[in-house]
Image: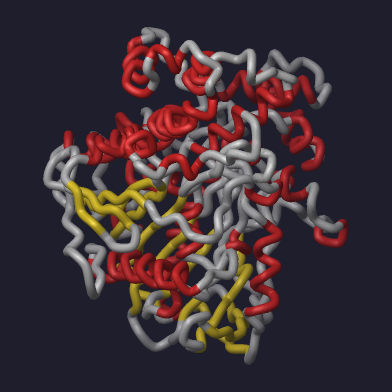
C-alpha cells in the first residue's frame, strides 16, 4: 500500500530552511556538482545539500520503457542547489503551476545528498519514498532532523506508474524499471558517495510503504549485488505483500493501449509502439484508475519469482528493522468510507458486515477461511449484523491493519526465519500519537466520523521535517532519529535511556513499542487486536459526526 505525498507541507520548509553558501564536489569521471548549505532544526548544525543530481540519462524517447542508463559525464559544473524534476504522476502534476511542467517531463532520475562533512567515512542512509508506486518525490524528505547525527542522507527519485511498473516482459517493455532505477542509484552511491564523506561499506536502505516494499524487493532480487547495501529498514512495507505483485501486466498494457485509442491493441508489438509514442500527459490520464506492482518474470530477471519465493534463496543477509504504525489500516478504512459515500450509500441501512466485507474484498481469499477467521476474531455476531458503525470502528481499524499491513510485515520476518536468516531482525510498532497527522493527506480529514489514530506515514513526521512539531513531538522525533541512525551506524537500534531493544529470537518476538516511553513485549501477534484491546479506543470516534 502507499499514499499520496503532501506537496503543501513542503512549503513550510522553504520558510524555515534558508540556503546559504555554495560548495562544490568533484565526482571522478563524472563532473563537478555545486551544492549549498543549510542548518539542522534542533541544534543549528551546518550541513551541505546537493539536490537534483542526475544519476541516469532521461528515460524518454528511445529510452522510455528501457533499463536506466548511467548519466554521461558533464563538462561544466552541475548546479545542484534545487530539487530535481518530479517524476510523471497525475495526482501531483494536476497541482503544479504550468511553468514547472515544461521541457522533458521524464528527465527525473535524480537524487539528493545531505552531509555535514566531506572528509569522513560516515554511514549512509538511502531513502526510497512511498506512494503506491505511482506518486511521491524527493522534495518532501530533507535532512533537517537526520543530519543532527553523523550520517550521510541520500534521497532518490525513480520512475512511477505506467512508466516504471508496467510492461510486457519483452525487451521493448521489460518491466520493473522503477526497481532497476533504485538499483542504479545504489550503484551510484557505491561509486561516488565517498566524495560526500560517506562510507560505501555501510549503506542502509530505508523506505516507507511502497518504498519499504522496494527495499524488500532489493533484498530478494538476484540482480542486487550483495555489496549494494548493508542494513535494511522497511516501514509499513513488505516484500511479501500480495498487492505488490502486478497480477496481469500484459492485460494492463492492453487496457491502456485501448484507452489511448490506438489500433491493434491485441498485438504486443502494437501495444508497445502505442505507449512508446504517446504523450506523457495522455499516458497519465489513461492510467488514472490503474494500480501497480512488481512484474514476476520480467525481461531482465530482476524478479524471476514472487518476492516471497525469492527471499528463501536470497544471497543478501543484513540486519533488518521492520514494523508498522499502530493504525496503519485507517488509511484503507478512510478510502472505503469515501467509496461508499461517493456511491450515495446510506450508512444507516448498511450493515457492519457489509462494510467489513468491503475491506475483505481486497484480499480476494477464494477459500473464505481467512475471512471467517478474521470476522470471528474481530466482530461479535450482534455487531456484525447491526448498523452500529461507530461501535465497529476499532474492529474496522484492526481488520484493515491485518489485511494490508501487519500480516504482511510479520509474514516478511517469518519468511526470513524460515530460511535460517542469520542477521538480527528488529521489529517495532510505532504507537505515538502526536499533535500532527497525515490522515487525509492534503485533502483533509474533517469529513470522516473517525480520527486516523496513528495513521499510515505518521512515523515519517518524526524523521523528516514535514510539519512543525511541538515540544513533546520534537522529543519523540529525537528518539526516532536516534533509533534509525544508531541502526545505520551499528546494525542495532539504541537509545541512551529506556530498556534495551532486543532482536527477534523467534517469529513472534520480542518486539518493541515506539512511544513515550519505549517498551518491549514478547508476542507481536498481540498487535492484530491492538485497536480493540486499547482501553482508550473511544478517542478514535468523532461524536459530532454521524457514520
Count of marks placed on residues? 0
Q: Nearer the viewer, residue 117 or 519?
A: 519
Residue closest to the eye, 110 or 263: 110
**In the rendering, at what x and y percent does residue 368 appear?**
38, 9
Residue 296 can be seen, yes or no: no
Classify residue 409 as left or right of residue 156: left
Q: Nearer the viewer, residue 208 or 42?
A: 42
Q: Residue at 14% of width from left, 49% of height from top?
A: 422
Give the side of residue 123 with respect to residue 260, left or right: left
Find residue 340 and report its image quarter. top right
Tell me the residue at 24%/40% (across/down): 524
Question: Residue shown at 24%/68% (left/top)?
Answer: 494
Is 530 above or below relative to 141? above
Query: Along the horizontal axis of the image, is 133 left or right of 506?
Result: right
Whether residue 284 can be seen here: yes
- Given the current orientation, which residue lies at the most extreme bottom position? 21
Q: Is residue 452 above or below residue 265?
A: below
| Residue 158, position as x, y percentages in the image | 57, 51
Which residue is situated farthest in the top direction here?
A: 367
Give residue 338's position: percent from left, percent from top: 66, 30
Q: Residue shown at 52%/33% (left/top)?
A: 293
Q: Classify residue 291 by image quadrant.
A: top right
Seen as rendered, the residue at the extreme front is 544
User: Residue 24 location, x and y as percent?
Assistant: 58, 86
- Quarter of the rendering occupied by the C terminus: top right
Q: How is the image coloured?
A: secondary structure
Amino acid at each position: 500500500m502507499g499514499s499520496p505525498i503532501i506537496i503543501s507541507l513542503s512549503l513550510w520548509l522553504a520558510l524555515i530552511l534558508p540556503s546559504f553558501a555554495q560548495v562544490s564536489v568533484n565526482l571522478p569521471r563524472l563532473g563537478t556538482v555545486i551544492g549549498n548549505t543549510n542548518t539542522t532544526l534542533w541544534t543549528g548544525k551546518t550541513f551541505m545539500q546537493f539536490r537534483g543530481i542526475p544519476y541516469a540519462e532521461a528515460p524518454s524517447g528511445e529510452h522510455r520503457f528501457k533499463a536506466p542508463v548511467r548519466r554521461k559525464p558533464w563538462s561544466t559544473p552541475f548546479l545542484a542547489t534545487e530539487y530535481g524534476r518530479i517524476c510523471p504522476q497525475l495526482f501531483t502534476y494536476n497541482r503544479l503551476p504550468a511553468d514547472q511542467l515544461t521541457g522533458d517531463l521524464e528527465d527525473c532520475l535524480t537524487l539528493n545528498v545531505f552531509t555535514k562533512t566531506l572528509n569522513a567515512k560516515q554511514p549512509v542512509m538511502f531513502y526510497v519514498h512511498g506512494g503506491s508506486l505511482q506518486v511521491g518525490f524527493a522534495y518532501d524528505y530533507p535532512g533537517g532532523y537526520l543530519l543532527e547525527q553523523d550520517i550521510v542522507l541520500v534521497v532518490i527519485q525513480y520512475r512511477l506508474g505506467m512508466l516504471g511498473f508496467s510492461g510486457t516482459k519483452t525487451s521493448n517493455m521489460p518491466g520493473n524499471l522503477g526497481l532497476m532505477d533504485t538499483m542504479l542509484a545504489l550503484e551510484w552511491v557505491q561509486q561516488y558517495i565517498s566524495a560526500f564523506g560517506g562510507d560505501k561499506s555501510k549503506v542502509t536502505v530505508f523506505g516507507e510503504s511502497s518504498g519499504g516494499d522496494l527495499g524488500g524487493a532489493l533484498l530478494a532480487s538476484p540482480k542486487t549485488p550483495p555489496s549494494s547495501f548493508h542494513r535494511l529498514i522497511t516501514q509499513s512495507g513488505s516484500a511479501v505483500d500480495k498487492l505488490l505483485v502486478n497480477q496481469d501486466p500484459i492485460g494492463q498494457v492492453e487496457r491502456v493501449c485501448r484507452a489511448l485509442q490506438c489500433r491493434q491493441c491485441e498485438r504486443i508489438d502494437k501495444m508497445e509502439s502505442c505507449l512508446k509514442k504517446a504523450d506523457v500527459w495522455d499516458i497519465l490520464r489513461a492510467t488514472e484508475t490503474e494500480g501497480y506492482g512488481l512484474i514476476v518474470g520480467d525481461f531482465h530477471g530482476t524478479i524471476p519469482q514472487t518476492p516471497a519465493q525469492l527471499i528463501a534463496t536470497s544471497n543478501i543477509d543484513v540486519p533488518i528493522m521492520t514494523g508498522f504504525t499502530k493504525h496503519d489500516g485507517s488509511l484503507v478504512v478512510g478510502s472505503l468510507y469515501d467509496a461508499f459515500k461517493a456511491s450515495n450509500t446510506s450508512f444507516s441501512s448498511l450493515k457492519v458486515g457489509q462494510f467489513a466485507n468491503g475491506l475483505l474484498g481486497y484480499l480476494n481469499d477464494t477459500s473464505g477461511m481467512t475471512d471467517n477467521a478474521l470476522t470471528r476474531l474481530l466482530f461479535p455476531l450482534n455487531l456484525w449484523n447491526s448498523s452500529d458503525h461507530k461501535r465497529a470502528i476499532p474492529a474496522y481499524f484492526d481488520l484493515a491493519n491485518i489485511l494490508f499491513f501487519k500480516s504482511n510485515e510479520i509474514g516478511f520476518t517469518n519468511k526470513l526465519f524460515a530460511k535460517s536468516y542469520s542477521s538480527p531482525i528488529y521489529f517495532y510498532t510505532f504507537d505515538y500519537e502526536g499533535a500532527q497527522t497525515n490522515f487525509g493527506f492534503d485533502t483533509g480529514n474533517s469529513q470522516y466520523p473517525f480520527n486516523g489514530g496513528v495513521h499510515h506515514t505518521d512515523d515519517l513526521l518524526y524523521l523528516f521535517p514535514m510539519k512543525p512539531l511541538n515540544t513533546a513531538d520534537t522529543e519523540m522525533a529525537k528518539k526516532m532519529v536516534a533509533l534509525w541512525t544508531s541502526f545505520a551506524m551499528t546494525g542495532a537500534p539504541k537509545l541512551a535511556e529506556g530498556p534495551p531493544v532486543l532482536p527477534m529470537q523467534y517469529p513472534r518476538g520480542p518486539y518493541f513499542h515506539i512511544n513515550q516511553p519505549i517498551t518491549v513485549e514478547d508476542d507481536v501477534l498481540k498487535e492484530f487486536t491492538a485497536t480493540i484491546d486499547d482501553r482508550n479506543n473511544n478517542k478514535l470516534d468523532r461524536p459530532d459526526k454521524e457514520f
